Amino acid sequence: MDILEQITTKGLTIAKANGLLDLAENYTIPHDEDKLKAFIKTQAYDLSKFSTLEHFFSQENLFIRAFVYTYGKGFEFTLAYMIGEPLERIAYNFDDCMTSNGLKGLPNEIRKIAESKIYIIREMFTEMFEMTRDKQSQLTEAGITFEDCIIKILNEAFFIGRRIAISIELDSKMTIQLEAETEDSKYDYDNYDNRYSL
């Protein structure tokens, strides 16, 4: 098992221990590798640039926000398929990411279910991020960058959001309307907002 897989396994062990991998699978949702890859790469690049330009040293604080946000986007992506309105693409929004607000597009009833698992999501991130730090010399030796690790970790957040979402049984009386943006909204490097303080 390579180091990236070990990091993933660390997070999935937490998910398994908390019953997230044993939830019912009520829907079959296709895994759109291209859409996810484009979303994660855009996000990882934007956040790395933000961290560098603003000289932040609290990478854990920055990326836990991204992890929770990406978890919510996994939920949103899946819900769109569940209601028969697949997203054209997964749009990235820097402000939502920095405020851990990936669940804003969900109806209240479903958002409450997603929010009830946030403590597990945070624990998963902490375990994977700590392992990334602990294995830094091995990662460097293997030619694996910090950004490679973050991309892998964010993939897991999306996967868990997706996994929990398919366990929900939608009520036919529930009205769901997702207002999904198709354009990315990246960090405005000319205007720093103090709300983003890490």
Image (spheres, grey):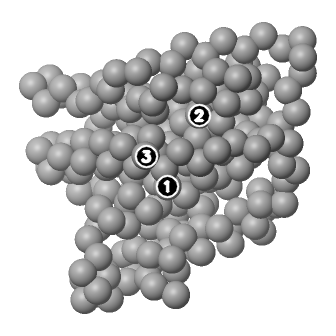
- Please, what secondary structure does the residue beneath circle 1 have? helix
- Please, what secondary structure does the residue beneath circle 2 have? helix
Q: Which residue in the protein does label 1 denote?
A: 155
Cα separation, mark 3 vs mark 2, equals 13 Å
Marks 2 and 3: in contact by CB < 8 Å? Answer: no
Amino acid type shown at disc 3: Asp
Q: Along the horizontal axis of the image, is 137 left or right of 2?
A: left
Mark 1: few/some/many CA within 10 Å (<14, 14-19, 20+): many
Mark 3: few/some/many CA within 10 Å (<14, 14-19, 20+): few
Q: Which residue in the protein does label 3 denote?
A: 34
* Residue 26 x, y percent position in the rendering: 86, 42
Residue at x-position 60% and y-position 67%:
11
Amino acid type shown at disc 1: Asn
Q: Which residue in the protein does label 2 denote?
A: 77
Q: Quadrant of residue 29?
A: top right
Residue at x-position 26% and y-position 30%:
186
In the rendered image, is residue 119 in sight?
no
Mark 2: few/some/many CA within 10 Å (<14, 14-19, 20+): many
Earlier sequence position, callout 1 versus callout 2? 2
The front one of 42 and 88 is 88
Q: Which mark is residue 80?
A: none
The front one of 84 and 96 is 84
Earlier sequence position, callout 3 versus callout 1? 3
Q: Is residue 54 above or below residue 125?
A: above
Q: Quadrant of the C terminus?
A: top left
Amino acid type shown at disc 2: Phe
Q: Along the horizontal axis of the image, is 124 left or right of 171?
A: left
